[in-house]
Image: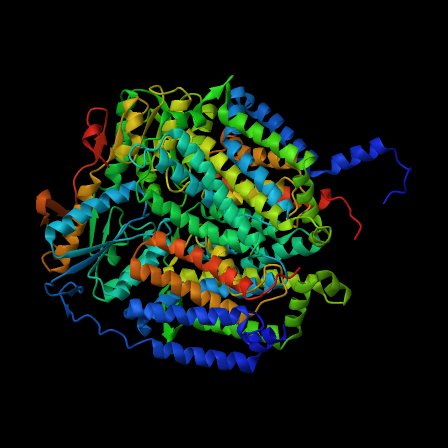
Amino acid sequence: MNPSGSKPNVQQAWLSLLRSRTAGLACFTTLILVWMSLWNPTFLAWSNMRDIAVAAAPVCIISCGLMLVLVLGEIDISVGSMMGVLAAAMGAMASASRWHLPPGVAMVGTLILGVCIGAINGWLVAYLKVPSIMVTLGMLTALRGVTEVIMGGQWITDLPPELRYLGTGSWLEIPICLWVTATVVLISLWLIHRSTLGRRIYAIGSHPKAARLAGLPIARTQCLVFAWTGFLTAVATLVSVPQLSVVDSGIGVGMELLVVTCVVVGGTAVSGGIGNLTGVLLGALLMTMISTVLIFMKLGENATYWSKAIQGLFILGAILLEPWTRSRKKP
Amino acid sequence: MKARLPSWLMNPESLLIGLGMAFWLIMGKLDHSFLQWEVQQELSTHIWETALMALPMTLIILTGGIDLSIGSIMSLSAVTAGLLHQAGWPMPMGCLAAMVVGMACGWFNGWFITRFKVHPLMITLASMAAFRGIAEGVSQARPLSGFPESFTRMGNDVWLGLPIAGWIFAGSLAMAAWIMHAHRLGRCIHAIGYNEQAARFSGLRVDRMLLGLYTLSGLSAAMAAILFMARRNTAKADIGAGVELGVITAVVMGGVSIFGGRGTLAGVCLGLFLIHETREFVSWHWSRDELNLLALGVLLILSVVFQQLLGHKRAS
Amino acid sequence: MKHCFSLLSPPHLLRGCLIAWILFLSACGPSAPSKSTETGADNQAVVAPKDTITIALIPKKKGLPYFTSCASGAEAAAQELGNVTLIYDGPTDGSPEKQASMIEQYALKGVDVIAVSPNDPDVVAPAMRKAREKGIHVIAWDADAVTDARSFFVNQSTAQAIAYGMVDTMVRDLGGPEIRAQVAIVTAYLTAANQNIWIEHMKTRMADTYPNLELVAIKPSDEDQKLAFKVTQDLMKAYPDIKGFFGISSVSFPGAAEAVKQAGESGKVMVTGLATPNSMKAYVKDGTVKSVVLWNTAELGYLTVQVGAALAQGALKAGETTFEAGKLGTKQIEGDHVLLGDILVFTKDNIDQYDF
């Protein structure tokens, strides 16, 4: 603990920035980009960067919501299965061979369904006081079963062109999903830094007891955050699933682990109270980039067997950085 | 309502016993052939590996931690034993090596949790990916089989009504129960779960115990891998995928608080039993696998909701 | 909290366990009498002709349209035969362990025939053998199991023919064996047993017959269409000269095709592989995909049920060389493989005739 006035504020600010997780991730990302540009210059082409961003988009969108859940001190591992069920529902609603509803109705229906599922999670956690890991673990299993039931052994191959446009269309040369991601990020930034809800989330996450004593509406906040995550999962489904022409029943499997890893690698504390959107986004981008990097490096057939190990070791490295970048807090 | 029910009825274990008996009655009504002894005995082989890993997981969750990497440790241990067997080592040595690998992986997790104060969720999430990746790389994603019959007998033989794996579980359960009740370690685990800081200040060797628990978890994963290899005569990098979810489901359903400090082994056994019977019965009676997932998820949510409603409060 | 501890203290725990054990044993009734069997010459128990035959049809992964279409053919056979009850169930996640557990369950239930398409032949082999010991006929279909664990294998085509068929189709689409081209394979999981066998045969075919084809990469898609899409996209960028992709799973094929289409390389980069015609119809129509390799899945399911029923009734025994398969006519049996016939290649010309 520095005695006040012994170091200029600017220097302190720089030091804390350098030690921060975000800076570390930004450095790492830059290093990878530089390395890859030397190894294979086409890596830095606009089309490649755009494709990496498009692939990272659904993860980024859901991470925005999941970060708030973790900051609150809860967890939500049902997002993958939620995405599966929402994709199946969206497909079933819009497909000509199923319920054949207008595309607009299918879109709104998917969003509402996402909010509802999130709200159920939130209600169970906030009002019935069930620990979030149990609720979302149960949801993860149950929703995967519901997805299979909705699909009924047949995949959906005839999404209407309006929905496909969400996934494949561009505006001003930038894919729609990137516009949506940017909007979601801006809304999240506003939520975290400018809104009362954001302040409450951080307060409840850092010290639940104090928050309760201060009279903060904890249950309502919890419910809202889970519903928001559900909404964001629906948004991610709408912009990423129509990129492909076939809606299969395995969509979203393993997504929850990927998102939690991104959020955690990005510097959000699992115990709550600490979370930083930039870090999360960088984490999502990095995680998506790894597989592309490995392909571009053309390491040969034997190396393919080690690609999972490389990804795992990378995550391990990112997580183990944490003790070194953690700011020393007073006990 | 709380005041009218006697206190011994209000804990999760009683709820689970009640649920179990209700399920038995329903299952018996719907399909009596399911309750035959031969059927139950053979179906039980599906659960022993999960049950074995649930024991150290209970202890770990009681301390407020978690271990998501058991499935991956399982695959790495299996691949180790498989590769050594292929290289000509005798099977017992291969199994020993698998157990050493399992303990090393567990120790790896524990070391980072205790020495560097990394949150268990984070480190085990990362090691889950890393260990499985290493297993895949080392085995080149190839299956390894052809284990000697003396080894595979262990997976299929039955002694006095219980498969050998069941006896191994029973032995481990007895040891775990002894640790929790007769040994100082049990009370220490509860103490760490209630308040780790206070436990430290009381002079408990918290770090050493946690390290030991995670190593034990790695060892149990290795033993589960050996049982799997004996039962299915194969070792591959993808075995044990998703098994951590099944184990955690069983543990939390058994009334163990995810925040640490509250929970019993009896509850976990009951949770395992309920999940196993539900899963097998839904498959048996309706033959629709998708219903299985739905039933399991609903079972978990309902049971934890009821646990909450009966007054079991979250440890703050 | 005291009561929690006391409930689990050794004396209570012991008492509780004892009571539970007794309750359990009493709830469980005596075992059902074992099936009355006579052992035939081939050491497989022969069962006398029965009134209803129960056949359990286990796919690799329930919910895949490929298997759903096989099941429709199987259902048709069951209806036609009249005395067959068909149970169609399989793991929704494609897990080999789950498959093995299901086989064990059906064996305990005492079905007459278990027909399984194994995800991993080694993992399900012990369960299959146990079922055979109980007197149940066990056959493999769609994908082969360990030889001594099943009496017959209903094969749509040999793994070699499927692999060779894909490579030959790719060469034809590219324009002939003299074209030099780089190709890549997008597979399912790296540990997927079937895909690995196909890949081995494909490599052999390319090395022996088409030296102008260069296999630059084999990448997994982990049964994730998005990942297949991304992997194909990345491969096209990393290898700008790549001319062909093999999508050898129902999920990786549409993903790869979509990536080629979105990159604007339809018609310049060839995509072929194994998938149901319905999932690829749009791509075939717009020219992204010239050929889809598969076989008549409904006939495969139909044939499987016919074989199963014949086995259960003793009409089919080991060593026979032909089999009368209802409306499919006479099928050849090579060793213990019942052959459906050849692979089918779906192109623009014939894809509309099929709806599965």
Farthest-out residue, top: A172
User: What percent of the width, then of the height, locates residue B189?
Assistant: 65, 67
Of C280 and B97, nearer the camera is: C280
In the image, B193: left or right of C242?
right
Residue A314: tell me if it is visible. no
> Which of the pair A236/B58 is nearer the observer?
A236
Residue at screen point 58% across, 67% down: B263
Expressed as whole percent of the image width and height from the top left, the position of residue B136 reads: 47, 46
- Give x and y (percent) for residue C47: 14, 65
Screen quadrant of the C terminus of chain B: bottom right
Count the labels in the image.
Answer: 0
User: In which quadrant will I find the N terminus of chain B?
Assistant: bottom right
State whether residue C98 appears in this view.
yes
Q: Which quadrant of the structure image shows residue C256?
A: top left
Residue in view at x 56 percent, y 45 percent: A226
Q: Is residue C158 left or right of residue C10?
A: left
Residue C332 in the figure: left or right of residue C22 = left
In this picture, is C49 found above or below C351? below
| Residue B7 place in picture, x, y as percent | 57, 75
Taking depth in this image into account, of B191 and A64 the one nearest to the observer is A64
Q: What's the colour scheme?
A: rainbow
Residue C203 falls left or right of residue A81: left
Q: Is residue C270 above or below residue C105?
A: above
Reply above or below: B108 against C254.
below
Residue at horizontal 54 percent and vertical 32 percent from the top: A289
Q: Nearer the viewer, residue C38 or C148?
A: C38
